Amino acid sequence: MKINILKALLESGLAQSEQEARGLVLSGKVMSHDKMIDKPGTLISDLSSLRLRNHKTDIARSAAKIRPAFSHWNIEIQNKITMDVGSSTGGFVQVLLENNARTVFAVDVGYGLLNPALRKSEQVIILERTRIEDLTIEQLPASVEFFTVDVSFTSLMKVLPNIHTLCSNNARGLALLKPQFEISRELAVNALQNGILTDQNLREEVILKIIEQLPSVGFTLLNRHAAFLAGTKGNLEEILYLQKN
């Protein structure tokens, strides 16, 4: 009996959620009888043949949230100047380097969070104790050609305006939209259960509201997709693929 590849990955223990399974498939990491499976609708009959190709240990689980987006949307950043906003331990930084970015500006309000391996990389320029809202173009050696964003406890609409200022013309980027941090405090009282936004209709309303505001901060939405891995608590986040107007 044949079963869907996503279900097979879950049953074999190679993925912990359907989103993770889908991400593994779309990023070309799933092999069966030494053949790559890159279509989520594929059916297989032999679970024992499944394995993951080049499955590295991620510096942070956040890497799995956006890694598949690069192959899913054919994003090419080789030799580009990039910036990761809210770098923390460096999950997104790792993915940018994997995709051959020339330079990564790792921006975070915290200090000492970035993984030691990334701190040693000559390609990573660390901008710690730095609010993205306060960063100026004069502080960067070059304009940003591609960016990633992963911020918590604040709205994307508060950080995107200055990201726009720091980017070159037609720069693109991936912004992780976290609906649980986009709703008002009044709504959060009833809408969040242990920090999780369970109302999927409200989740979609929040996402669409942010998308509607993008032109006002100088960005166009190229595409959107659910994050390929849910948040730590189980929140369903959204990836916005953006381009500077």
Image (cartoon, rainbow, N blue to C red):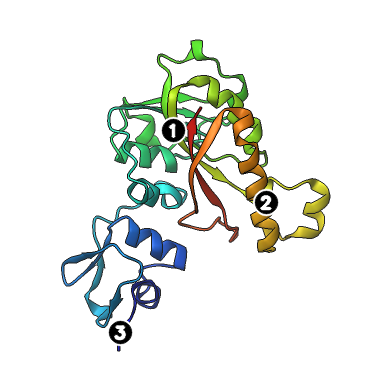
Residue found 17% across the figure and 72% down from its top? 33
Which quadrant would the N terminus be assigned to in this image? bottom left
Give the SS element for disc 3: loop
Q: Which residue is mark 3?
A: 2
Q: Is 97 on the left-hand or right-hand side of 33?
A: right
- Residue 100 in the image: state x and y as whole percent: 28, 35
Q: Is 109 on the left-hand or right-hand side of 222?
A: right
Give the SS element for disc 2: helix
Furthest toward the bottom, the residue is 1
Furthest toward the top, the residue is 138
Give the Cα distance between marks 3 and 1: 40 Å
Give the Cα distance between marks 3 and 2: 38 Å
Label 1 is placed on what type of residue? Arg
Residue found 56% across the figure and 19% down from its top? 135
Q: Which residue is mark 1?
A: 172
Label 3 is placed on what type of residue? Lys
Sequence-earlier tag: 3 or 2:
3
Q: Is residue 130 visible?
A: no
- Residue 207 in the image: state x and y as whole percent: 63, 49
Q: Is residue 147 above or below residue 177?
A: above
Q: Which residue is mark 2?
A: 180
Asked if the residues shown at circle 2 and circle 1 are in contact, with their CB atoms under 8 angstroms apart, the answer is no
Q: Is 125 on the left-hand or right-hand side of 185?
A: left
